Amino acid sequence: MTGEEGPAIEVAGLRVAFGAVEAVAGVDLSVPAGHALALLGRNGAGKSTTMRVLAGVVPPADGVVRVCGHDVRDELLTVKRLVGYCPDVGGLVPRATPWEHLQLSARLRRLTGWEPRARDLLERFELGNAAHRVTSGFSHGMSRRLSVLLAALHEPAVLLLDEPFDGVDPVGVEATMEVIDDARAGGAAVLVSTHLRDLAVQACGEVTVLRGGTGVATVPAATMAGEEGARAYRALLD
Ligand SMILES: Nc1ncnc2c1ncn2[C@@H]1O[C@H](COP(=O)(O)OP(=O)(O)OP(=O)(O)O)[C@@H](O)[C@H]1O
C-alpha cells in the first residue's frame, strides 16, 4: 500500500503531557498492515490521546510515532493523508449534511471517482435517507456512524477509530465491523479504542490495555473474550 517496510503503526515510548497532567507516559504499539489492534483501558487511561497523536492532531512530547514509516513530527501532512481518523467526539460541522462532509473530505484529499463508494457507505450505514440533512439534528449514534464512514472514505492505509461503537445500534455495529474487515483485507492497519470489550475482541486480533497512560499488556484478543476475558481484563485494571 505504501511501499514502506515495518509496521504501519509504530509507537515507541510515547509521552504526552497537558500541563501537569501526563496523559500518556510511555506507550508502545506496533500494528502491521492488514491487522487490527484494540486499545482498552479505563476512562483517562490515554487511549484518545494516543489516537490523536497518530492522527496528527496532538504533538508527541517524546517517543517515536510513525505511520507507514513516516514520522509524525517530520512528515505531518503525509501522516494526515495516510490516516483515516474517527475522533471520539466532535469532528462534524453542524450546519453541513453528510454529503457535504463527504464532498469536503474528497476535495481536501483530491479524490476522484469517490461518489459510488460514498453512496455505498451511506447505504451500508443506513444514512442514505439522511444524506442531505444537516448533522445538527443527528442522534448520537447517527453522528458516530457518519464519523466512521468519513474516516473510511478514502480507504486509508491506517484507520483510527476512537469509540466507533459508542451508542451505535446493531446495524451500525455491523457496518463498522465490515469497514474494519474491508480495511484489513485491503492491507490497512486498524486501531480501535473502545470500552466494549466483546466488540474489541470481534474486531481485532490483538488488544493493548492502557493504565494511567502506560501500556500494561498486549495480548491476543481471544484472551479477552467472555467471562474469563472479563476477569483477565479486570485484573489488568487494578
Ligand atoms: N486537552 C487536554 N487538556 C488537559 N488534559 C487532557 C486533555 N486531553 C486529555 N487530557 C487528560 O489526559 C488523560 C488521558 O485522557 P484520554 O482522553 O486520552 O483518555 P481515554 O483513555 O481516551 O479516556 P476515555 O475512556 O474516558 O475516553 C486524562 O487525565 C485527561 O483528563
Image (tube, rainbow, N blue to C red):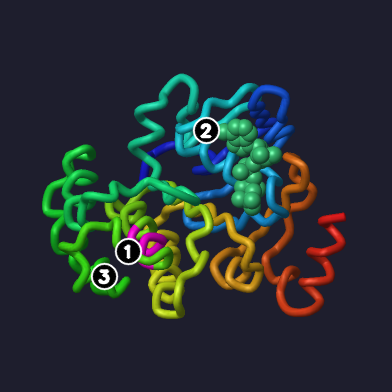
For marks 1 and 2, give the one nearer the viewer. Answer: 1
Kindly identify the residue that appears in the image at 52 percent across and 33 percent down: 66
Three-letter amino acid code at the position of disc 3:
Leu
* Image side of residue 138 versus residue 101, left or right: right
Taking depth in this image into account, of 154 and 157 the one nearest to the observer is 154
Residue 52 x/y as whole percent = 51, 38
Residue extent of the magenta highlight: 142-146
**Residue 110 visible somewhere in the drawing:** yes
Contact check, label 1 and label 3, Cβ < 8 Å: no
Between marks 1 and 3, how big is the CA–CA gap?
Answer: 10 Å
SS at mark 3?
Answer: loop
Q: Earlier in the sequence, mark 2 or mark 3?
A: 2
Q: Provide the residue designation for mark 2.
A: 66
Specify the label residue 127 is tagged with.
Answer: 3
Amino acid beneath label 1: Phe
- Residue 143 among magenta residues: yes
Q: Residue at x 65, y 60 (%)?
A: 206
Asked whether 149 or 222 is in front, the reply is 149
What residue would you read off at disc 1?
138
Can the viewer see residue 11?
no
Q: Amino acid at mark 2?
A: Arg
Density class for disc 2 (Cα within 10 Å; few <14, some 14-19, many ≥20) is many
Eyeballing the image, is 148 above or below 79? Answer: below
What is the quadrant of the C terminus in the image?
Answer: bottom right
Q: Nearer the viewer, mark 1 or mark 3?
A: 1
Tell me which secondary structure the magenta stretch mostly adopts.
Answer: helix
Examine the rendered structure and indicate whether residue 126 appears above or below residue 72: below
In front of the other: label 2 or label 3?
3
Q: Which residue is at the far front?
A: 137
